[in-house]
Amino acid sequence: MNEDTNREYLDMDLLRFTTAGSVDDGKSTLIGRLLYDSKAVFEDQMEAIEQSSKRKGDEIVNLALLTDGLRSEREQGITIDVAYRYFATPKRKFIIADTPGHIQYTRNMVTGASTANLAVILVDARKGVIEQTCRHSFIASLLRIQHIVLCVNKMDLVDYKEEVFDRIVSQFKDFASRLDVPQIEFIPISALNGDNIVDRLDNMPWYQGGSLLYFLEHVYVGNEFNHVDPRFPVQWVVRPQSREHHDFRGFSGRIAGGVFKKGDEVKILSSGFTSRIKKIHTFEGDLDEAFSPMSVSFTLEDEIDISRGDMIVKPNNTPHVGQDIDAMVCWFSDTSKLQVGRKYVLKHTSQEVRCMVKEIRYKVDINTLHKIEDDKEVELNDIARIKLRTSKPLFFDSYRRNRITGSIILIDSGTHETVAAGMIQT
């Protein structure tokens, strides 16, 4: 790839999407078909899966083998870990998070979906909307994914009947009316045969919409980042150990929201001191302005004591500051339960603090989205609303407003296991 082509590739619009669904809904086959039909598969890869398909006795080339990378996945024929795939078309580049369908791997789905702009949720045309469909859709809604594509797969096994597709669309719309997802699209597909994946074939003339790839190439995700509220969590204090830069003191990190310009007045949390941005540094050179999600370094006009975990904001636009946190959490641990009074390590942006569970308010019934207030035993894959008390103040926004400053994870300090991911509610 020459320099001009590389620059063009890097400047292309990027879409991050996750795939989800129940076991055997065909997620790996769908992604394999997407990669194969969009010419994103190398010849040696294709030869390898052709040989593997023959050894397994498959009558046709098993495109799922393109994505099931772990030996244990290939042996079981299921996806058990999050796998990230990368490909590009002339219109856009993509990062796919292929997540497991088994209920015990729901935590993997949360991980894969946490940075996604869009979720592709598969439904088996023979089974319709099931519990895992509801679970994954609710998690996508919780994670503030703005776009869901419901792909009704295996239409070839129901003779491509329009009434089957319409019935599943109606089922899902009834459930999704209680979700907070601005855009939901419905596409009938056959991942095995390639119907409506990259190209529209002739098996479903009653379907007048575009293919899955057409939608992925054209969906607008430019408003996914918060460019209103300036937030810069400090990850690293830069002090070069050289004579040439002995007086340099910069503050590095990734902008979590808003726009910062050279000369802007800024406020430092937690100290409350103010200063102005002297320079904005990047590897490519200095900038006049920077915005989320860029990674930069700031130097300030005044010498202020700033450490990792502090946050640089604007004086007239500050986040919530407090020690009492109200959050929705998805419980990840299969060895311990969430308990009132239990202490954990909480990670939020670049901060790491101790916290204690003050209250478990309710659990959520995945199928009905009703609150369960009389059963507060939170176990693996449960979703619950809880209250936490932290050992020192956090600088946060609601997850609805900012996915970066509104998210937390909980870690068991004894085992170092990540036991929960949470979305702050305000």
Image (spheres, rainbow, N blue to C red):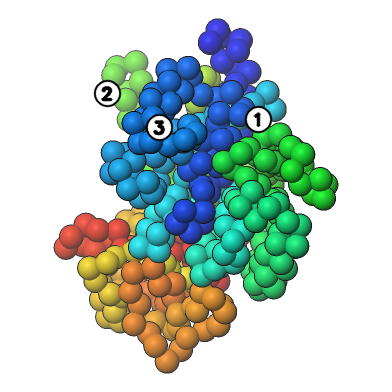
Circle 2 packing at 10 Å, graded few (<14), some (14-19), many (20+), is: few
Q: Which picture quadrant has residue 264?
A: top right
Q: How far from the left and from the top, in percent, is residue 127?
A: 57, 64
Asked whether the viewer can see residue 34, the reply is: yes
Q: What numbered label is drawn on residue 53?
A: 3
Point out which mark residue 241 bears. Answer: 2
Q: Position of residue 193 (x, y in %)?
A: 61, 39
Question: Mark 1 Cα within 10 Å, few/some/many (few <14, many 20+)?
Answer: some
Q: Nearer the viewer, mark 1 or mark 3?
A: 3
Q: Quadrant of residue 413?
A: bottom left
Q: CA distance from mark 3 to mark 2?
A: 56 Å
The earlier-in-sequence mark between 1 and 3 is 3
Say which amino acid is labelled 3.
Answer: Ser
Q: Please tell me which residue is depicted at 59% across the width and 42% down the height of the picture.
A: 191
**Secondary element type, mark 2:** loop
Residues 164 and 348: in front is 164
Nearer to us of marks 2 and 1 is 1
Q: Secondary structure at mark 1?
A: loop
- Residue at 36%, 20% (x, y): give it: 245
Q: Earlier in the sequence, mark 2 or mark 1?
A: 1
The image shows residue 49, relative to residue 8, as above or below, that is: below
User: From what the image shows, is residue 271 above or below residue 331?
Assistant: above
Q: Residue at x 27, y 23 (%)?
A: 241
Question: Of circles 3 and 2, which is in front?
Answer: 3
The amino acid sitting under disc 2 is Gln
Q: Position of residue 302 (x, y in %)?
A: 46, 39
Badge 1 is on which residue?
A: 92
Residue 369 versus residue 255: which sits nearer the camera? Answer: 369
Q: Would residue 316 be seen by someone viewing this image from the given angle? A: no
Q: Amino acid at mark 1?
A: Arg
